[in-house]
Image: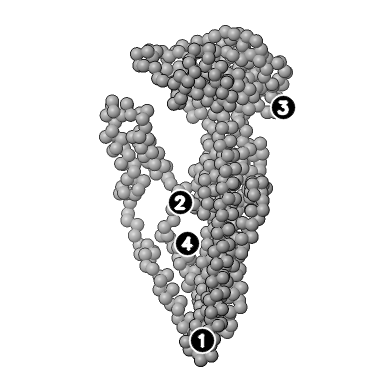
């Protein structure tokens, strides 16, 4: 059986311009951004493994926090910061400033809350253990606490609404730019594995705008959390400096900080901490994960269902999926000695609870010397808040560093130019001529990325303006590949291709596409009329009507598949 592919020329006149030898590329253009020496190379360097310089981290993998990566993060942040600032400033400038200011104010709220509660505790203590008390002062303190809570609630409501508006606007802009990246880059550009990884990490950066550090991602908008944590940390340190008095309080402060920080130190430095690192996946794990996804796609794909039913592939799909899934879930026994030792045993002992219990001993000693329960409660709350806030600040900083590399991928992807687009100084304007377009191919060859054997080898043809060519051949003989090269969907590897006597690489592919038409082998049919299917993407409805009128399709006629008996053999 053979298939038939028709390529009709509707391209027109050529305005001849000299195309210098310096502009004629011997091969496809380099798939690198305009300024690879700055942003692109910094992002690319961050993906290298420290112990294997020839290997790169998978796309989206967590970068280790090293001196080199910190310098790269600083470099990327310096280059991307103006673009990110412009992103928020152009959408809602004053609301963006309000987000930062409100974040600083909200960071001090826990201190005001603790101070208000301390005053109320002291007054209740006087009420219970002293004969000198006034109900008016207690009522006034309770009223002040009510007003404070009300003001905090109002400010939180305003902050939530304001942040949601600013974040939604910024999210719309980055998602629009993400879509623009996808539709702008051509097939040869996306065939480069490095560019694919760059675009993948750019997509991860866009997904981080969902907010609240989802999926351990931190968007530039979430950076305001750092301001909140810094404000809270400074406020608690100020409270501790004002409440510290005597050697006993200093000893209590040191012991409290160490005991409160122990759970985090325990989780960071114990060798058997439960830390998930996707970059640590080996080749075997990645192969099983890929096979598992392939089997799942086969089970749900409607296009493969006839083959699955006809050849009885169901049991094979289930067995293959089950084997790979068990391996990825760790349900399959791994060869090797059992990994169980003293450190793993100690990791399951909750020493943190014992130290937290012992933490109450110094406070009991301070209770004997301090007449105020409120100040003691404020002191202890501030000590614990300092440790927790410092830990959250540390985790947020780690997430911010990873977010900077993703932000660098997004900004670098915006600088990538399509591989088929010629340089500005080398671009030749295409103008139509009557009769069609002349195509000349000399020793045209093309090899798909990753393949050794070429799909096309030494193709020679000449089509005069107005001629029609039919390409006939077996499946896989290269008919569709040649058509895509002539349509500037793909770029040829060797040889030459001239349109109206000019090297095709001098033309903007978009200009040629506007004067071309094709029905690809794997075309998609949409549920709608013939005019809707022909005019997909046309803004003017009358253009689609003109395109379907010569074919005799009635207006509003629905598009249907041809019966099996009426199809070409």
Q: First in sequence, mark 4 or 3: give its number.
A: 4
- Which residue does the numbered mark 4 point to in the structure image? 268
Residue 152 seen in this snapshot: yes
- What distance separates the C-alpha of mark 4 from that of mark 2? 14 Å
Q: Residues within 10 Å of mark 4 (few under 14, many from 20)?
A: few
Q: Are marks 1 and 3 in contact (CB under 8 Å)?
A: no
Q: Which mark is residue 43?
A: none
Viewed as shown, does residue 362 lie left or right of 237?
left
Q: First in sequence, mark 2 or 3: give its number.
A: 2
- What distance separates the C-alpha of mark 1 from that of mark 3? 85 Å
- Nearest to viewer (mark 4 / mark 3): 3
Question: What is the quadrant of the C terminus in the image?
Answer: top left
Q: Is residue 235 above or below residue 302?
A: below
Question: What is the quadrant of the N terminus in the image?
Answer: top left
Q: First in sequence, mark 4 or 1: give its number.
A: 1
- Nearest to viewer (mark 1 / mark 2): 1
Provide residue 547's location: percent of width, then percent of height. 54, 17
Question: Which residue is pictured at 66% across the width and 12% down the height?
Answer: 433
Q: First in sequence, mark 4 or 2: give its number.
A: 4
Provide residue 92's location: percent of width, then percent of height. 64, 49
Secondary structure category for the residue under label 4: helix
- Which residue does the numbered mark 3 point to in the structure image? 425
Q: Quadrant of residue 441?
A: top right
Q: Which mark is residue 126?
A: 1
Secondary structure category for the residue under label 2: loop
Provide residue 332's location: percent of width, then percent of height. 31, 47
- What distance separates the C-alpha of mark 4 from that of mark 3? 56 Å
Q: Which residue occupies the foreground of this view, 541 or 117?
A: 541
Q: Which mark is residue 277?
A: 2
């Amino acid at each position: 059986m053979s298939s038939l592919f028709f390529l009709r020329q509707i391209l027109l006149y050529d305005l001849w311009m000299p195309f210098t030898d310096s502009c004629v590329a011997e091969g496809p253009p380099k798939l690198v951004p305009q300024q690879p020496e700055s942003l692109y190379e910094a992002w690319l360097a961050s993906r290298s493994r420290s112990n294997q310089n020839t290997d790169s981290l998978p796309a989206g993998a967590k970068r280790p926090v090293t001196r080199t990566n910190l310098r790269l993060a600083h470099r990327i942040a310096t280059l991307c910061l103006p673009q990110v600032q412009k992103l928020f400033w152009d959408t809602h400038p004053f609301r963006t400033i309000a987000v930062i200011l409100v974040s600083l104010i909200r960071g001090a709220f826990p201190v005001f809350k603790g101070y208000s509660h301390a005053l109320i505790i002291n007054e209740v203590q006087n009420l219970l253990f002293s004969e000198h008390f006034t109900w008016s002062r207690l009522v006034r303190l309770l009223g002040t606490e009510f007003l404070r809570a009300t003001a905090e609630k109002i400010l939180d409501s305003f902050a939530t609404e304001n942040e949601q508006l600013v974040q939604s606007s910024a999210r719309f802009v980055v998602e629009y730019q993400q879509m623009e990246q996808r539709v702008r880059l051509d097939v040869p550009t996306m065939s480069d594995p490095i560019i694919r990884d760059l675009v993948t990490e750019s997509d991860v950066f866009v997904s981080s705008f969902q907010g609240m550090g989802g999926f351990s991602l931190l968007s530039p908008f979430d950076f305001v959390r750092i301001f909140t944590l810094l404000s809270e940390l400074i406020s608690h340190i100020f409270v501790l400096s004002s409440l510290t008095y005597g050697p006993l309080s200093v000893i209590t402060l040191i012991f409290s900080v160490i005991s409160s920080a122990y759970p985090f130190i325990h989780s960071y430095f114990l060798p058997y901490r439960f830390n998930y690192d996707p970059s640590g996946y080996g080749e075997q794990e990645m192969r099983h994960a890929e096979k598992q996804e392939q089997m799942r796609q086969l089970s749900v794909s409607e296009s493969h269902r006839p083959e699955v039913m006809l050849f009885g592939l169901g049991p094979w799909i289930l067995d293959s999926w089950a084997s790979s899934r068990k391996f990825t879930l760790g349900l399959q026994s791994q060869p090797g000695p059992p990994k169980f030792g003293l450190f793993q045993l100690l990791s399951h002992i909750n020493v943190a609870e014992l130290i937290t219990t012992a933490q109450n001993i110094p406070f009991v000693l301070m209770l004997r010397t301090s007449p105020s329960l409120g100040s003691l409660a404020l002191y202890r709350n501030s000590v614990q808040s300092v440790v927790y806030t410092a830990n959250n600040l540390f985790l947020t900083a780690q997430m911010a560093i990873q977010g900077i590399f993703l932000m660098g991928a997004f900004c670098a992807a915006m600088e990538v130019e399509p591989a088929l687009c010629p340089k500005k100084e080398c671009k030749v304007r295409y103008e139509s001529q009557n009769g069609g377009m002349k195509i000349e191919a000399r020793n045209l060859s093309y090899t798909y990325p990753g393949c050794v054997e070429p799909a096309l080898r030494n193709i020679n043809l000449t089509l005069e303006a107005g001629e029609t060519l039919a390409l006939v051949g077996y499946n896989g003989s290269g008919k569709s590949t040649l058509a895509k090269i002539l349509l500037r969907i793909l770029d040829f590897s060797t040889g030459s291709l001239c349109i109206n006597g000019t090297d095709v690489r001098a033309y903007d592919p978009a200009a040629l596409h506007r004067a071309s038409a094709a029905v690809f082998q794997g075309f998609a049919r949409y549920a709608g009329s013939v005019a809707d299917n022909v005019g997909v993407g046309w803004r003017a409805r009358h253009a689609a009507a003109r395109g379907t009128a010569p074919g005799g399709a009635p207006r509003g006629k629905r598009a249907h598949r041809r019966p099996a008996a009426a199809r070409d053999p």
